[in-house]
Amino acid sequence: MNTKESAKKTLVTGVIGEDVHIVGIKIIEHALRNVGYNIVSLGAQVPQQEFVDAARETAAAAILVSSLAGHANVVGKGLRDKCLEAGLENIRLYIGGQLIIGEQPWSETEKMFKEMGFDRVYPKDSDVNQIIKDIDSDLK
């Protein structure tokens, strides 16, 4: 995706639920801005409905959810349904970070979040460049 194409894409970002761990999403936001994306950063402790409202108001192409507290399997459940109810059938949902508490094979964690409606799921040590490549590919 070239800069002109990506400049047309708005992404809503934030840290979901009670989580205050914002450094990871800030790094991703910076990298995405550098390649031309318009970022609507909601900050930390963002309720699901705020993600949906911001995406609808800005005609966003995607929502990027960060969670490092390990409760994403609780606070992220139902986000896809809220998007559908708001008429955001085509919005892409991304989630990443320390998504669960405890040890579980990554394949099981990824499967759980995809079943919840997330299009892409990233562990806490993901490569920012890979995330950008995935977003570029998904939003063509």
Image (cartoon, rainbow, N blue to C red):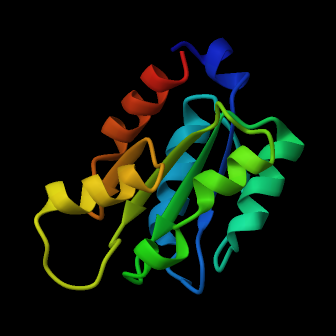
Taking the image as shown, residue 92 lies to the left or right of residue 117, namely right
Identity of the residue drawn at 64% across and 30% down: 90
Q: Can residue 132 be seen in this view?
A: yes
Taking the image as shown, residue 46 lies to the left or right of residue 120, namely right
Residue 2, by quadrant, is top right
Is 79 above or below relative to 44? Answer: above
Identity of the residue drawn at 27% across and 55% down: 110
Is 115 above or below relative to 74? Answer: above
Identity of the residue drawn at 31% across and 37% down: 130
Q: Where is residue 22 drawn, in percent x and y?
A: 53, 73
Q: Where is residue 59 drawn, in percent x and y?
A: 81, 35
Q: Where is residue 50 drawn, in percent x and y?
A: 78, 65
Quarter of the C terminus within the rendering: top right
Taking the image as shown, residue 139 lies to the left or right of residue 127, namely right
Q: Where is residue 7 drawn, in percent x and y?
A: 70, 24
Q: Is residue 42 visible?
A: no
Is 133 above or below relative to 49? Answer: above
Identity of the residue drawn at 32% across and 53% down: 122
Residue 47, by quadrant, is bottom right
Q: How many marks?
A: 0
Taking the image as shown, residue 28 lies to the left or right of residue 14, namely left
